[in-house]
Amino acid sequence: MGVRCSKLSACWWPPHFKSARLENGAAGEDGSGVPVFAEYSLDELRAATDGFAPDRIVSEHGEKAPNVVYRGTLFSSGRTVAIKRFGRSAWPDSRQFVEEARAVGLLRSGRLSNLIGCCCEGGERLLVAEFMPHDTLAKHLFHWETKPLSWAMRVRAALYVAQALEYCSNKGRAIYHDLHAYRVLFDVDGNPRLSCFGLMKNSRDGKSYSTNLAFTPPEYLKTGRVIPESVVYSFGTIVLDLLSGKHIPPSHALDLIKGRNISVLMDSCLEGHVSSSDGTEMVRLASKCLAYEARDRPNLKAVVSTLANLQKDASALSRTLLGIPQDTEKEESSEQMSFSSTGRAYATANLEVVHEILVNEGYDEDEIATFKVSLSSWPGQPAESIHVKKHGDDAFHSKDFMTLVECYSRFIDTGAMESPTMLVRRGFANIVLGRSEEGLEDARKAEGISPEWPTAHYLQGMALICMGMEPEGHEKLKIAGALEAQRKGRIRTV
């Protein structure tokens, strides 16, 4: 579980939750509002995914080089992330992997699911990116359940992906590997974003395309090399997907276009919802992007310009176009709710700040008075009980959490005194030591003794978030925030 830290150690975060971001003292976010790129430890990512549990998998593909993407929750920040774990044979050159990841991690755009970290330990290679909760473009196009994707959202998806590719190209990352509809994701607001994972090659063999050869750029089949124009070709296949609502091989689609059988190509679900001119312009764009000769394809700037002119509902909210239910919106907004500085520390599991808060809070007057009375119930000499409590308090202040748990447990187990402060401190120590469930139990006991004490609720919220139960955790944090507001101005003595 945890590791006993020296009382003199300045670095008390448990090793299984350490990352370069913490060790370097870097700020949590850059100017874009996205966390700065960091190198995470394997233990931290293992904890974030409950030991890479199967029920955390959101996608997996590849036979020769299997890659699995997990939904994880970073203990250090409480942030939900996507964690891609490469197969054992991938990226044998660890230095090359980290250099590539760092380069991609410099990109920051609202059109990308941005890369925020990586892990390279032993044979393990993992990438950490922003989590996109509303599935892939492929899911909404090919496997929709309630209603098909609207024309307005299809145009927006094409435009946003083109803008993402243009941004990457302008930043010196013109090559995108294996571009297809599964690489396009929808964020919390329903905005289409391009996965950052495609900006790095798939595996040690350096192959840039794992899809059916029918969808592969002609020049790649000839030379095995990807050029910027190859990306435009792959983008053209996505435009075909958007037009047809199914995955049609480019050669077949081009035959239909040349034969002026555009109506056969178009998704029947779009009938009556797309003007003839808009449909024709989109087909023309797909045809240009899929030109056999790379030099005949348009550049990304021209592609973006064409799609911008086709977007008629620019002011419409993406979540409305995607059909995200209102109750889902409320649930997701709770993850971004406004907290006090205290609530924010618990919500992000900022252990340094939470520890400082608990130190400043101390014992209240009632607990001090009760402690004096309880000395008569101590099974040994009163001096011994004072020593055990003081030793536990000193351990808390010096962050020696193993000793704290030992001393407070000895005191609490006698039943001589019920101290919510001791329970909260022991609960916090258990969370630090990687025992979030025990920490949650202590916080609940503290609430049982002091139901209106915000700290007992705050700690439960933090424990739940650390256990991957974000909605339940945020509910507890809301209760704690309301209690904190009611008790404003009340003083607790140290």
Image (cartoon, grey):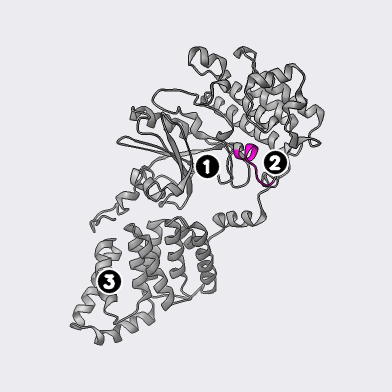
Q: Is residue 404 above or below residue 83?
A: below
Frontmost residue, 428 versus 396: 428
Residue occupying image coordinates x 37% and y 69%: 442
Q: Residues within 10 Å of mark 2 (few under 14, many from 20)?
A: some
Residue occupying image coordinates x 55% and y 20%: 228
Q: How far apart are labels 1 and 3 at the CA level?
A: 45 Å
Quick one: label 2 or label 1, which is nearer the N terminus?
A: 1
Residue type highlighted by circle 3: Ser
Residue type highlighted by circle 1: Gly
Q: Which residue is mark 2?
A: 148
Q: Which residue is mark 3?
A: 409
Q: Are marks 2 and 1 in contact (CB under 8 Å)?
A: no
Quick one: label 3 or label 2, which is nearer the N terminus?
A: 2
Residue occupying image coordinates x 42% and y 23%: 206
Under circle 1, the secondary element is loop
Q: Residue 455, can we see it?
A: yes
Q: How far apart are labels 2 and 1 at the CA level?
A: 37 Å
Give yes or no for residue 6 being in the magenta stretch.
no
Residue 39 on image: x %, y %: 38, 40
Q: Is residue 231 above or below residue 33?
A: above
Q: Which residue is mark 1?
A: 31
State which mark lies toward you, 1 or 3: 3
Frontmost residue, 292 versus 450: 292
Under circle 3, the secondary element is helix
What residue range appears in magenta?
A: 139-146
Give left or right: position of 272 versus 439: right
Q: Residue 72, can we see it?
A: no
State which mark lies toward you, 2 or 1: 2
Give the image quarter of residue 231: top right
Residue 224 on image: x %, y %: 48, 16
